[in-house]
Image (spheres, grey):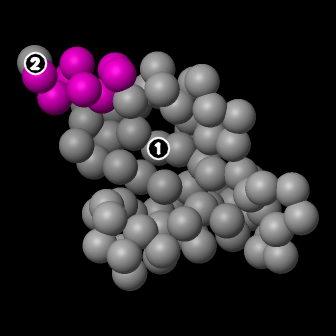
Amino acid sequence: DRQLSLRDEIVQWIQTQDRLELVGEPSFLNVCVRVHPPAGAEIKPEEWSRYVREKLRIEDTAMVNFSADEKGTFLRLIL
């Protein structure tokens, strides 16, 4: 139950962030989110989530994976 509550908190937080877009409804403990680049970013918008994922991995900040759909890449967080 605690993990489901945490998932719901994360989803609510994502919905308040201008540069984050929830990709579909969460499935169990999977939360998929697209990260939009800041204005003037040199990386293509459809590749920005992959860039963020790699930065998080290198800095050992978070363990997330990425996937893709017709709009580009997005992060997949598994709680």
The three-letter code of the residue at mark 2 reads Asp
Region of the chain picked out in magenta, as a range: 2-9
**Badge 2 element:** loop
Left or right: 77, with 75 as reference point: left
Instruction: Tell me how many marks there are.
Output: 2
As measured in the structure, the alpha-carbon distance from the residue carrying label 2 to the one carrying label 1 is 20 Å
**Up/down of 68 relative to 60, above or below:** above
**Which residue, given by chain and number where applicable, does mark 2 sit on?**
1
Q: Which residue is mark 1?
A: 32
Magenta highlight on residue 47: no
Q: Which of the two discs, 2 and 1, labels the residue nearer the N terminus?
A: 2
Question: Residue at the spot x=63%, y=51% of the render?
Answer: 35
Q: Residue furthest right?
A: 40
Label 1 crowd bin: few (<14), some (14–19), many (20+), radius 10 Å: many
Secondary structure, mark 1, is strand
Q: Is residue 9 left or right of residue 74?
A: left
| Quarter of image, res 58 | bottom left
Q: Could one spot residue 68 in this view of the protein?
A: no
| Residue 43: quadrant of the picture | bottom right
Specify the principal SS of the magenta part.
Answer: helix
Amino acid on which disc 1 is placed: Cys
Q: Position of residue 23 (x, y in %)?
A: 57, 38
Q: Position of residue 15 (x, y in %)?
A: 57, 24
Question: Is disc 2 surrounded by few (<14), some (14 to 19) or many (20+) residues within 10 Å?
Answer: few
Which residue corresponds to the image point at 39% horizontal and 39% vertical from the top-left?
A: 31
Residue shown at 32%/41% (left/top)? 30
User: Is residue 23 toward the left or the right of residue 56 in the image?
Assistant: right
Residue 52 vertical position relative to residue 71 in the rendered view, above or below:
below
